[in-house]
Amino acid sequence: MTLPADHYRTLKRDLSLAELLADGIVHALALLAGLIAFPLLLFHGLQTTGAGTFAALTVYAAGFFLMWGFSLAYNMTPPSALKWLLRRFDHSMIYVMIAGTYTAIIPHLHSPAWAWTLGIVVWTGAALGIAVKVALPGRYDRLSILAYILLGWVGVIAIGPVMAALPTLSLWLLVAGGATYVAGVAFYVWEHLQFQNAIWHLFVAVAAGLHFAAIAVALA
């Protein structure tokens, strides 16, 4: 199965070798940073927190590596049926990463009711988004950008409990990470810009790093 002939992505220019190399380097650096940082985070969590928090951190780590792993595979694969299949996983794992990040924050909430509510809302949204990406590939792609942003900021429904539970620095880091993701969308849609893909993924990497820092601060 390949991209539909009338899909807007068929009009996208082919990336140069230099652009592909730059994008690959961004992915490799993000994965390398994760391989260094997450074992430290998980080890600290194992030593200082309960099983629930450690499990939440494990889900968060899995989301990170699934997102960057499938993104690397998809973006480095030449146009083909395999690339079209990888595209479904690449886009789906963005939802997993967003929900996984929330999962790492939820154990810090003092209210079990809010913790369960936020978890159910986030993972239900992620499941619905994944279902659309898998069942209707290539459709509603523009709308899915808005869906990613809305899911990423859905935590405002629990802003009171989150502010009460997290250190001020963690809150600012979370906001900065969310703002960085949103700012990066401008480069995601700016398809005629040279090195657009690498710049977009660099924004994603910086945002993920800010969120990692927020979770590490809260854990410490």
Image: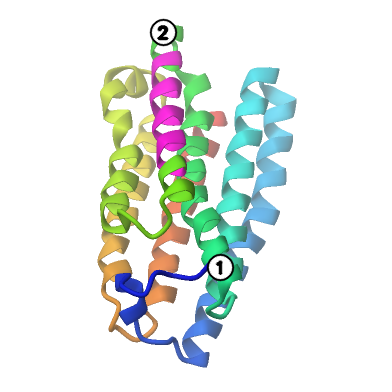
Q: Residue at x 69, y 55 (%)?
A: 36
Quote the CA–CA distance across marks 1 and 2: 39 Å
Q: Quadrant of residue 170?
A: top left
Which residue range is magenta in the image?
Answer: 116-130
Rate crowding at label 1 as few (under 14), some (14 to 19) or many (20 or more) other CA atoms within 10 Å: many
The disc at residue 74 is 1
Q: Secondary structure at mark 1?
A: helix
Q: Residue at x 66, y 63 (%)?
A: 32
Q: Mark 2 and mark 1 in contact (Cβ < 8 Å)? A: no
Q: Nearer the viewer, residue 73 or 23?
A: 73
Q: Position of residue 62 (x, y in %)?
A: 64, 43
Whether the magenta-drawn stretch holds residue 119 is answered as yes
Q: Is residue 38 visible?
A: yes
Q: Position of residue 188 (x, y in %)?
A: 32, 68
Q: Nearer the viewer, residue 67 or 89?
A: 89
Placement of 8 over or under 22, stated as above or below: above
Quadrant (top left, top right, bottom left, bottom right) of the C terminus:
top right
Q: Residue at x 56, y 76 (%)?
A: 80
Rate crowding at label 2 as few (under 14), some (14 to 19) or many (20 or more) other CA atoms within 10 Å: few
Whether the magenta-drawn stretch holds residue 54 is answered as no
Amino acid, disc 2:
Ala
Amino acid, disc 1:
Tyr
Q: Nearer the viewer, residue 108 or 101?
A: 101
Tag in front: 1 or 2? 1
Magenta-colored segment: predominant secondary structure: helix
Placement of 116 over or under 80, stated as above or below: above
Residue farthest to the bottom, as pictured? 17
The disc at residue 113 is 2
Placement of 167 over or under 161, stated as above or below: below
Specify which label sits upstream in the sequence, 1 or 2. Answer: 1
The disc at residue 28 is none
Q: Secondary structure at mark 2?
A: helix
